[in-house]
Image: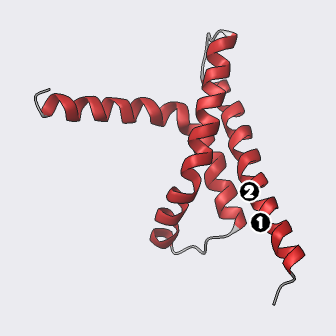
Amino acid sequence: MAEPASTATSVLLVKYGVVMAAFIGSILSLGFLKDLTRGQAATAVATGFFFAVYLTQPVTMWLAPKLELAVSDYLLCGVSFVLGLTAMNIIPAIKSALGAFVTARGA
């Protein structure tokens, strides 16, 4: 059985690892976006960061069984990084899909 102190430390490191991976991914996503003002760049980073932080756990829980992977710290951090990196492309796709859904329903 693991010691409580080491378990608490590992939980904190996992949480910070996901946060750091999300932030780094969202910062690197700026390389794909051109001609942004400082405000737009800050908004893009914040959007990618929060998108990744809040969706890492659900996406990992959905993805792990499909790929037959064990949920580990490395997988959580990897998913967080990829979500942060691709959030600026995923969000417009979600908006257009919702727009098509609303239009199809006749609203």
* Crowding near the residue tagged with mark 2, few <14, some 14–19, many ≥20 C-alpha atoms within 10 Å: some
The amino acid on which the numbered mark 1 sits, given as a three-letter code, is Val
The amino acid on which the numbered mark 2 sits, given as a three-letter code, is Lys
Q: Residue at x 42, y 29 (%)?
A: 92
Spatial CA distance of label 1 from label 2 is 6 Å
Where does the N terminus fall, quadrant-wise? bottom right
State the count of labels: 2
Horizontal relation, residue 32 to residue 10: left or right: left
Nearer to us in this view, 31 or 27 = 27
Circle 1 is placed at which residue position? Answer: 11
Q: Are marks 1 and 2 in contact (CB under 8 Å)?
A: yes
* Crowding near the residue tagged with mark 1, few <14, some 14–19, many ≥20 C-alpha atoms within 10 Å: few
* x then y, percent, for residue 13: 81, 60
Q: Quadrant of residue 69?
A: bottom right
Q: Residue at x 12, y 34 (%)?
A: 105
Q: Secondary structure at mark 2?
A: helix
* x then y, percent, for residue 30: 66, 25
Horizontal relation, residue 92 to residue 39: left or right: left
* x then y, percent, for residue 52: 60, 44
Circle 2 is placed at which residue position? Answer: 15
The label number, if any, that marks residue 102 in the structure image:
none
Task: Classify 35 as above or below 59.
Answer: above
* x then y, percent, for residue 88: 53, 30
Residue placed furthest toward the bottom: 1
Where does the C terminus fall, quadrant-wise? top left
Horizontal relation, residue 16 to residue 59: left or right: right
Q: Secondary structure at mark 1?
A: helix
